[in-house]
Amino acid sequence: MQKMLNEFTIGESGVVKAVGGEGKIKRRLFDMGITPGAEVLLRKKAPLGDPIEITIRGYELTLRKTEAQFVTMEVKK
């Protein structure tokens, strides 16, 4: 099942399938290590849901929901 990273719930994990967006946003996501094939675990969400904290490639990364909405994920079962 595919869904966007900003739709994940705490503890959910998956694999990056595609990174959307254009220009600076796409480049920023790639520079942070969010590339197709990378495994992601959603660790935390702020009380109002923004930002979110993920674990990717062995480190913790904080993203805004506006950034996470460009990342298409394949959910692990």
Image (tube, helix red, strand yellow):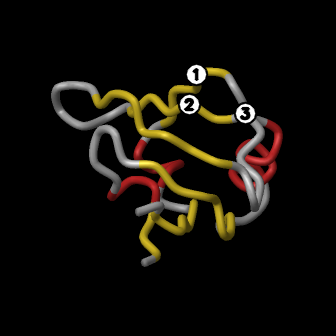
Q: Secondary structure at mark 1?
A: strand
- Amino acid carrying label 3: it is Arg
Q: Is residue 43 above or below residue 74?
A: above
Q: Alpha-carbon distance for marks 1 and 3? A: 8 Å
Q: Quadrant of residue 59?
A: top right
- Name the residue tied to disc 1: 60
The reply, left or right, for residue 29 in relation to residue 44 is: right
Q: Which mark is residue 55?
A: 2
Furthest residue toward front: 77
Residue at x 29%, y 39% (from the top left corner):
10
- The tag earlier along the polypeptide, 1 or 2, is 2
Give the image location of residue 52, x and y in percent: 39, 33
Q: Alpha-carbon distance for marks 1 and 2? A: 5 Å
Give the image location of residue 23, x and y in percent: 78, 59
- Name the residue tied to disc 3: 57
Residue at x 58%, y 26% (from the top left corner):
61
Furthest residue toward bottom: 1
Q: 42 or 25: which is nearer to us?
A: 42
